[in-house]
Amino acid sequence: MSSAPSIAAPARAGWLPLGAFILCTLIWGSTWIAIKFSNDAMPPLWAAGLRFGIATLLLLPVQWAMRIPGPRTATEWNLALFVGVALVWLDYGLIYWAEQYLESGLTAVLFSVMTLLTAIVAALAGLERLTVAKLGGIVVGIVGVAILMLPDSGGAAEETDRLKKTLAAGGIVVAALCSAMTTVGAKRYGKSMHPVALNTSSFTIGTVCLLATSAARGEAMVLPSSPQAWGSLLYLSLGGSVAAFLLYFWLLKRWDASRAGLLSLLTPVLAIFLGAALRNEKVTPRMLAGSALVLGGIFVASRFRGGSK
């Protein structure tokens, strides 16, 4: 099979990509708890739409000042549409909706399977090899997800709550698949597109979809009413959307998809710690066991990479 073109390969070993990776880890590891605070003040899809709407307004003058052209070719427009729908609308819409029912730490762990799903999607797309080690890690990670999705014991009165949590957990796995697909799509088709242009165009599309879905669900269009809620919204918009996304898509031009996906190995650890410290979220033995299997599977699958094709 012919090789996919390598993007900025000489920069692969540089310190700047590593710095971008660390900063993305710190930002995205803390966004899970920020989403919980945001959901306390606003309906989920409205909150997500407001977040990306603000991020879009912040990016537009940057794109104008830097004279960065928007999507020009059919490939670039298709990529922007795909990222806007799959990542901004579906991925983040599901995350915000699911965090109504799940702890932020558990949500982060479930979403971390994105790394394993990225390996599968990248292999199907012909970008990377699906090795035995990767397959083994994927199997271990799937077992961990199954443990995390097991319903808690309780009486009949808790059946509805357990069902909501199970559906929410499934929604996070679907969100992780959407993220994996956009990671591979951006890696394969975004080599000629500036990250600012990709983010601005895809954020615009995703914001419209999120706000339209919010309106269709009859969500209240309210603004944050406390400094904490405003702080969460602005942090998610500026840090979690603008800064982290620019860094991540820049990183994808220098690292392969699975290597960049290692973010999902580190962010859950920070998310679990912050959830326990700031919201007294419970960390049960079952959650620890499932998390260990998921993160262990990610480590095995990523540690012994087959390399890019």
Image (cartoon, rainbow, N blue to C red):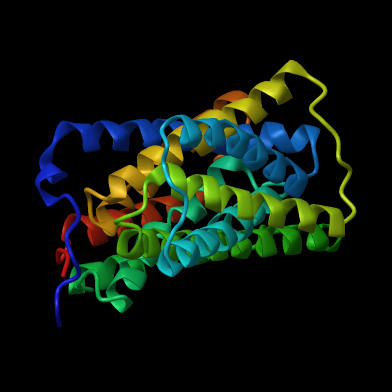
Q: Residue furthest top?
A: 227
Residue 163: x %, y % from top left: 74, 64
Residue 167: x %, y % from top left: 68, 64
The residue lying at 62 percent from left, 62 percent from top is: 171
Reply above or below: 306 against 93: below
Q: Name the side, left or right, on which 19 lies relative to 117.
A: left
Question: What is the quadrant of the N terminus in the image?
Answer: bottom left
The residue lying at 78 percent from left, 58 percent from top is: 213
Question: What is the quadrant of the C terminus in the image?
Answer: bottom left
Q: Name the side, left or right, on which 111 lies relative to 162.
A: left
Q: Name the side, left or right, on which 29 lies relative to 189.
A: right
Where residue 12 sits, quadrant-wise, is top left
Q: Is residue 147 visible?
A: no
Figure label count: 0
Reply above or below: 141 against 303: below
Instruction: Report the front residue among 25 and 58.
Output: 58
Instruction: Report the front residue among 161 and 11.
Output: 11
Instruction: Report the front residue among 174 and 246.
Output: 246
The residue lying at 49 percent from left, 54 percent from top is: 111
The residue lying at 37 percent from left, 47 percent from top is: 194
Residue 177: x %, y % from top left: 48, 65
Residue 37: x %, y % from top left: 69, 31
Q: Name the side, left or right, on which 170 lies relative to 6.
A: right
Q: Is residue 226 visible?
A: yes
Instruction: Report the front residue among 275 and 152.
Output: 275
